[in-house]
Structures are given as C-alpha cells and as structure tokens.
Image (cartoon, helix red, strand yellow):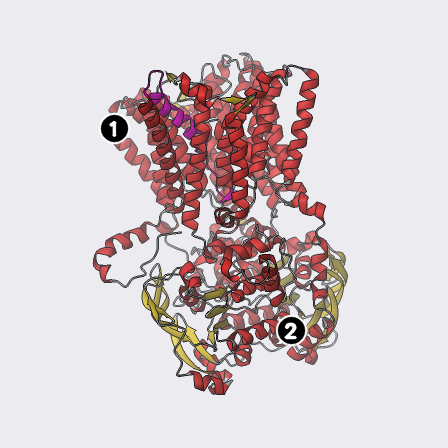
Amino acid sequence: MTENTTTMVATEATMSLVGISKYYSGVAALMDVSFDVRPGEVHALLGENGAGKSTLMNVASGTTQPDTGTITISGQTLEELTPSLASSLGIAIVHQHPAVLPDLTVAENIRLAVPSRFLDGTGSRREAMQAMLDDVGSSAHLEDRVGSLSIAQKHLLELAKALVMKPKVLILDEPTAPLGQDSVQLLFDRVRTAAAAGTAIVYITHRLAEVRELADRVTVLRDGKYRGTMEVAAITDDELLTLIVGRQLESTFPPKHHSTEGTGTYLSIARLTGPGFADISVQAQTGEIVGVAGVVGNGQSDLMAALAGLAKFEGSITVHSQERSAKDLRERAAYMPADRHREGLMMTLSVRENAAVVALQRFVRSFFMSSKEEVSTVGRELTELSVKAPNMDANVASLSGGNQQKVVMARALLSEPALVVADEPTQGVDVGARAEIYRILREVAEDGTPVVVNSSDAKELEGLCDRVIVMSRGRVVAELVGEEVTEARIVAAAVSATAHGSADAQQVKTTTRRSTRLSRFLQGDYSPVAILAIVMLALGAYVFSQNDRYLTAFNTTAIQGLVAALGFIAMGQTIALMTGGIDLSVGPLSGFLVVIASFFIGVDSAFGQIALGFILMLLAAVITGGLNGFLIRYGRFTPVAATLAVYIGLQGLSYVLRDGPEGIINADVMALIKTKVGPIPVAFIALVIFAFLLEGALRYTRWGLTLRAVGSDEEAARRVGVHVNRTVLLAYLSVSLCVFLGAILLMAQIGIGDPSQGANFTLTSITAVVLGGTSLLGGRGTFIGTLLGAGLIIQVLNATTFLGLDQWSTYFFQGILIVIAAIVYSQVRGRRAVV
Amino acid sequence: MAIDTATDVPATAVASRAGLWARTPRGLITVTAAVVLLFAFSAILAPSSVTKGPLLGMLPFAAVLAIVSLGQTLVVQQGGIDLSVPGAVSLTVVIATHQAAGDDARLLPAVLMALAVLLVAGAVNGFVIGRLGLNPIIATLGMNALLYAVVLWLSGGIPRQTTDLLANIAAGLTFGIPNAVFFAIVATVVVTLAVKRTVSGRRFEAIGANPVAAWAAGLRVRRHRTGAYMWAMVLYWLGGCLLAGILNKPTAYQGDSYLLPSVAAVVLGGTSLLGGRGFPVATALAALFLSQLDSFVLALGVSFAARTLVEAFALAIGVALYTVDWKGLRTRFLGSGKASAAPPGAPAAGP
C-alpha cells in the first residue's frame, strides 16, 4: 500500500477542491478548505460531527453550492457543479442517509439513478440490475418496494448504484455506520477492488480503525477549517486525535462501577419475548450499566423499544423489585432513540420545550403551569449537562448533534425515570460530547437508576458497560460481565454466532414480510381498481333491478358525459397528489375557464374568435399552473396555502368578469364537443385513452419516475439528480392542462358563463382520486383508479335519482363512500397511523 | 447539516431566556400591525367603514369567524385541516332554528342536541384520523358530507326564523358592544390558557410538532389528537349558535362561507399548516382583519369580486411573510450590486 502511494504522489488528482467556503446564514460551515483525491487511492476524511465533512462532500457532488472556491475534475475547472453534471463527470456519492425512494421499487430506484448506458450490456437490463445487487451481496428482490427494505439493504442498494457507474470518484459518507460486521468486510473488499481499478475514493468516517485499515491518506477537518493532510502510515492515532479534537483526550470513559457484594439487583429481565427478539434474560447489580451488542439488525433495537414500553412483550421486566408492564414503562422509562430527528426531538420547538415536555406535571402550581418554576428547573438541568445554546428559547434544530442528544438526555433526567433506555446514544455525536454523555449515563446508574445501552460500536460498550449481552437472531448468545467486557469478546460472540449463514441473521425481521402473489397485489396500486370495479358492477346491477330505465342509452350517455368532465379534472388532481401536494384551485379554475369561454365562444362568434377563446383558456390554465408551482417551490408555500390563495383569487376573477350566468356558449361548438360514437360520447373515449396514456407514462417514462420520486422523498430525489423544482412546476402545469381539458367539457355541459360553477370540482376531484386509491402522502397512485373513482361518484349521484332518494342521500353516499374507501385501503395495505 | 452554531456560547447561557421581543411570536406582531394599518387605511380612505353602523355590523361576524378559526387552529396544530367546518356550523344553525322552532323554551335542548351531534362527529373524526390513520383531508371531507346529509334531512334545505332568545343573546349589545365579541374574547382567552399554560396544552403542541417523538416520549398521541377534533367542534358549535342568533333567517348552507376564511385566518395568524405551535390570539386578530377587510372594500364601493381578490392577495402576502426567506433575498439582491465580482456558483434559488 505504502509503496503504491509514494508512486502516486506524482499522478494528477482526479478531483481537487481549492479554497472552498460555505456559509449558512452567516455561519461558516467551511472556511477556505482544500482537498484532493488521486486515482486509485483511498483518501479518508476525518473530523467531528459538524466539522464540515458532509458539507464538503455535498459541494463535491454538486448538492451544495459553495460561496467561494474552485472545483477541478480531471483537469477541468468547473463554473458550477450540479448533481447531474457531477454524475456525468463520474462522481458518485453514497450518502450516510441512503438517497433511495421508499415508494418506488428497487428496479425503479436503479433506473432513476443510473443512466441506462450502464445497464446495457450483454444481458437484459433486469439481469444487469440483478447482477448489481448480487455484486454487493444484497438479497433484495427487484420488485420489492424500497420502503420495505432494512436500513442495511438500503445502503447496499445505494452502494450498488454507485459502483455500477464505474465512477472516477467514489464518495462514501460513513458507510459502515448501519452495517453489521459481515457487511462491513464485504464493503471493504468492494472499496479495495474499486481503488485497484483506478477509482479515487473519498472515505468519510468517525472511526480511526477504519482509516488504518483502508486509507492511504487522511485529511482532517475541524469546525469547517482544514487541519492538514498526511499519509496514514506516517501518523499515529494520538496525533490524529489531537488534530480532530484539538486537545488531548485523557480518558473518554468514566471509571466503571466497583461492584460491592450485596447491593442487590436493580434490574431484572426474565424470559422477555416480543417482536424481533425472544427469551432474553439478564440481571443487573445496582450501579451497573447494561450493554446490548450484536450485528446490527438482530433484534437489539426491538428489545430497546420493548424496554421503553413502546412494543408489546411477554416475560417480565422488574425494576427495583417492582414488575413493570409495557404501559408503566412507556410512562416511566426514559427512552433515547437512535433516530433523534424522527423519534427524539420536536425540531420546530425550543430547547426548553423539548426538555420539559415529559416533566410538565412538576411545574403545575394550583391549576396552571408556573413558567418561573419551569425555567429554573429546566435551566438547572441543561446547565448540569452543559448543553451549549444561546439560550433556552433557541430552536433545538439550530443545535449540533451532540447538544441535541444532551437535550434528549435532559428530558429523560427531568422526567425522573425508573429506567433509562439509550439506543445508540452517541451516533452522530462528536467526541467531546460523547465523553459527557458517558459520564452522565454513569452518574445515572450510580444514583440507582438502571441504564441499558444499545450500541453497534463494541469499543464503546467495552469502555462504558459493566455487563453486556450479545444478541444474534433475536436471542442472547453471550453475556459478558466485568473484565470479560472487551471489544474482542463482544465481536467474537456476535460474529461466531452468525458464522453459519449471515442471511439467517436477517430472518427474524424479514420472515414477516415474505410476500405472496396475493399480498403483493393487495398492497399494490391496483387493488383499489379491482375493488371499485366490483362495487360499480354491484351498484349498477342493484339499481337496474329496481328501475329498468337505468341502462337506457340516454342515461348511460349522460353518465359518461359527466364522468368525462370530472375525470379530466381528477386526472390533474392525481398528478398533484402524486407529488405529495394537492391542488385546491382546480374547481374554480374550471369555472373560470368556462367564464372566459363565454366571452369568445359565443352564439355569433366567428371562427377566429372561437380559436382565440380556446387559446386564452389554455393561457389562463398555464398561468394558473405556473403560479401554483411557483408559490409552492419558490415562495415555499405549503400546497394547501398556495392553491387556497389561488382558489380564492380565481373565484374573485370569475365574478369580476361575470356578475351572474351570462354569455351563451356557441351551439355548434357544444355539439362538436358532445359528439358521440353510438351511445358513447367521444369525450369519454378520449378520457379513457388519456387515463391509460398517463398510466403508461407514470410507470415507464422518466416523467413518471421523477414525479413519483419527488412525492416519495423529495430530498432523496434531489440527491439522485432529479430537478425537484422543475418537476413540481411541471406537475402543477400538467394539473392545469388537465383542468383545461375538463373545462372544455364542462363548458358544453353548462352552456353559459356562470361564475358560481366549478368550485365543487375541487372536493369531488379529491374524492375521486382517493376512491381510486392514490395516496395523499405522495409517491404512489394510479390514473386508472382515478378514472374508476370518478365513474363511481357520478354513478352514485345518478343512482340516487333512479332510486327516488332525497337530496340528503347524495351527500350521505358521498360522505360514506370516501370514508369507507379510505379506511378499507389503509387497512388492506396495512398502512396505519405512524403512531 | 448540523452546523455547530453554538460552539462559542458559554455553557451557562442555556439557563437564560431569550428577550421578551424575541419570544413574542412573529405572527402576532405581523397581524397586530396589519390590523392597525387596516383600520388606519379604513379611516383615511373609507371613513364610513369605521363608523358605528358598519362596525356593529361587522363585529358579530368577525367574532363568529374568530371562534370558528380558533377551532381550525387546534386541528391545524395537529398537522391536520378540518374541512368539516361548513357542515358543523350549518348543522348547528339548522338544529338551533328548526328544533327550537321559534320557541325560547326549546332553545336550550336544541343547542345541547347540536353540541352532542357535533361531539360525536368530532370523536369520529378523531377516531378515523388518530386510530385508523386516515388523512385528515379525506376524513373531514367525508364527515362534512355526512353532516350536510343530516342538515338536509332535518331542514329539507328550507330556512327558518331564528328564536328570539338566541337573537337577543347573540345579536344584542352590552355596553354598546355586540355580545358576540365578548364570546369571542372569552373563547380566545380560554383557548390560549388551555394551550399555553396547562400540561395537556403543552403536550398538545409537542405532539403536533412531532407525533412520533411525542409517542416515543410516552405522551398519549391519539387522545390529544382526538381532543383537537372534538374541541374544534365545540368551537364550531359556539360559532354556529351565535350565527343562528345573529342572522334573522339563516339558510341551510350558512357554514359554507366559513371554511376558507377560517383556514386563511389560521395561516395569517402564523400557525404552520405542518403542525406544532399555535397562536390563538393572532388567529382571532386575523379573523378581525379579514372581516374588516370585507367591510372596508365594501365601503369603497367595490363589488364582491374585488373583495375576494383582495382576500386572496392578503392570504398570499400573509403566507409569504412567514415562508419566504426575506433576509436571504435582501442579501442576494442588495448584495448583488457589489458582489457581481463574486465568484460563480452563487447560491442557487431556494428549494
């Protein structure tokens, strides 16, 4: 290795960044940082959290634009680097949080991120994609929805996407954090192979051991400043550490508990069984910190959730000789989740509010809460934990990872817990804060509150814990006490237990979701289509049995005509919902367009005037769509707020143009629009064809992939090179164009410019889309379902007249339909509330 | 992404509070300023709109909108949106007029019956959203249709004369001020105290800000969420009762005109549609703002159409005040003059 590096000093750098600075609202994330990486070398980037490593690499991959500095790739100095330009120049990045789209399948994720030329080889594309997965040792199925994969599998997918492009520069951002030991070895092998093939590799990490094992050179950042670059072989761990933290760390871990006989057990877990783990037993002496170890994904996190009372379990948990139920634990155990942003903190609230939220009862004086009491108590605790923040009203999102974790700890301690459950307490936390977190956990245990710590870092458990259980496949395979608690013993126990078949380790988690053909269909996008078809047939048969005029040509034609207008508008709404947004303005827009038409497409209008009318309608639609998209993307309005403002504005414009129903529409034009082929209106046929075309586009074109990608996970979509702004803007333009088509049909139905018409289509179109099974969360949906949804609504409204029901019943059926449909779909797909 | 902005901060700073000005919600400041400006404009441009008659005409409706918007605020705080406002208000109005049938003695049972129906509706909303995980838009859209089914079933769509007692309570004056205003003030104070100064209220805000984290911290997410929809219904009920008394002959569709303005008032008040912190006082002031805006534009002699347009603009500007990164824009545009020499790769447009 060393010999290699010396010969490479002369080689030109594949990528070099010079004098990069980046400020976020005046705060420097990077200051004049330079970095380069040569072909065939592994260059490690080291530093504490917040040191600027990830920002620097985001600059290198085009996701972040630097304020100053130059980027040179293969000798070419770039003006501006975008994610798509970066990937075309051969820069691939594997993010710490995988940039994968949960609602898309594995194959779709690959197609979206990997240019097709990398998939065109000897075999079919499917084979190429399968080979990619096999190459990194992933066991995922190409048709699996990525949302259902484990974190490790997502990372492997991410790595596969990067490797297949044979990148010139491969950036790995803390790649081993979520991986188990076996996957780590596999990853290292792949990295070495890639480097041997001449790829320049940037390896971001927290772990010195990995630098030693893998890297040729290492660059250290601290507080956004460059600290130096050196050959790995020429520097000691202590020297590196000094560069990283800027001070000599004397001891990272507090002294361990000195067990004195007869203090008794303060925590006893007996035969605990629950989802993901089985038959766990362990007893801790008073003052001991219990560690949970093992290859990631072997039930450790499930066990932690159960200890925190967040999951059901059998067996018993006894704290201070008092047995605790899951319900007790949820209230009395303090849980420090691994995913702080999702499960730990209310990011929009202040430090004080976050810290106090569980302990509020303590501050009640007479009936209301005492703010004075709260401020002094919370302030004392935060000071105790030396949380660094400008003041306690600062937004918790503005704090660094380590300080955020301390806020979580402050909350835990303020709640005076019976048990502290810490899941990966130091993940994403800098070295300095780590030592303080260890100290605090130790103090809590010494004070008599049991502490259980899960960590994927065996070294951390060795330093912190007095007793460690090692888990594999959801069971305890070893319990280490006192002197036995060493990294070597822990790793040995974890690895040897899984030695025969590492896939087995995943079994506990994956068995439950092994999909059958039926379950895949039920959870897929097309089950609502089948359900709707059955409901419509049954309803039709029933109404026909009650009234034989139901199926006359006159009625079916009328129904189809009505479906066509609603259908086109609902198609548009489907597009908006697919992006995870909503367009409330579709109803008023359709009405407004008809009002415009009533001025130009009048009874005596000449051809030119009529043509102008259509052009103006189209123009108004385009402007509306553009405005919606602009407000949402560039004005940062929520879709509801943006389209609500446009909704009100369009209604106002309609009334500006027409006080009441006026301006009869040209009869010839109306007749043309209402043309029929036999009993079937041409417009209806057009709608059906339109729906199928959109459906095809959604599945097989880049437009459809990007649309769903943005709705599924905007950030991840951006990182795989999707132009999010453009996609959303285009989506809202498409919505308005669909409304334009619907408005033409509506015009033929109303026959007059009436400013009060149209607004109802907003809610009806949403109802149609929901009946069709499109998710309001974005990313998933089907136009065919929307088509049937629109059909069902019109059919129901029509049926009430044939069944001789009153007006109230139409409301009743609309209401009951949408609620039942939504409940059925959510239950069938097993998609319950997040909590 | 986690930039350590706090490295230079002394460790003891965290025990201190931010200044009073910094702690005053931006929404409250903005809305107060907007209301003051609007009344100043009204006095200058359309003095007739701030005379006794128009004010007494406007205030009761402003009060109803304020109360309804407070309910909407609670739902929005939980990251939801309540589309069942029209149905709930209309149903209250219809029950209060049709069931009481002009008889003062039957008024109390009638309004209590309305409250009971609305509470059931709120509980159902809460159940399907909180427990079954339905999207709030869908659930409340369906609930609105169901409530309207009851409205039409009870009334057949026919308006009915309101009861004298209710008219006296809701439309009467005390110390020269419409009674409805007192109801709105009390409702605002109660909601503010409940949300900001009680344990449940503080938990309520935390749950709205991040339900997953709140659940992991041991809070009862479903109960608070369901509570939002039920308490919102209580406020719609109060608004509906007042409306039934203010109007001489309320129609069956009286609630329709409260859905969009209630959302507009919440947004103008600075409560995020994504959930979290709520600003009841700002919401109530925003309702006053919207109502006075109506009456101001009316006094200028402009048609209904222009009023709607002005409302749309007010809403858009109101949202933009909170969402657009004005500081960033200012530095970009003001800075662009001297920074034209700045290296390429200037920050791209916002996300």
Q: Amino acid at mark 2?
A: Cys
Q: Which residue is mark 1?
A: B43
Residue B333 is tagged as none
Q: Nearer the viewer, residue A427 or A451?
A: A427
Residue A586 included in the magenta stretch of the image? yes
Q: Amino acid at mark 1?
A: Ala
From this viewpoint, which residue is outermost toward the left?
A: B338
Contact (Cβ within 8 Å) of mark 1 with mark 2:
no
Q: Residue B23, percent across and down?
A: 39, 50
Q: Residue B192, percent across and down?
A: 47, 40
Q: Quadrant of residue A808?
A: top right
Is circle 1 on the same chain as circle 2? Answer: no
Does residue B121 appear in this view? yes
Indicate the quadrant containing the N terminus of chain B: top left, top right, bottom left or bottom right. Answer: bottom left
Q: Chain of mark 2?
A: A
Q: Residues within 10 Å of mark 2 (few under 14, many from 20)?
A: many
Mark 1, secondary structure of its residue = helix
Q: Chain of mark 1?
A: B
Q: Residue B219, percent across and down?
A: 60, 49
Residue A409 included in the magenta stretch of the image? no
Residue A465 is tagged as 2
On the picture, is A110 further left or further right than A721? right
Real-space Cα distance between discs 1 and 2?
A: 73 Å
Q: Magenta stretch?
A: A578-606
Q: Nearer the viewer, residue B22 or A501?
A: A501
Mark 2, secondary structure of its residue = loop
Q: Residues within 10 Å of mark 1 (few under 14, many from 20)?
A: some
Does residue B235 appear in this view? no
Q: Nearer the viewer, residue A686 or B200?
A: A686
Q: Is residue A736 above or below residue B54?
A: below
On the picture, is B336 further left or further right than A205? left
From this viewpoint, which residue is outermost toward the front?
A: A122
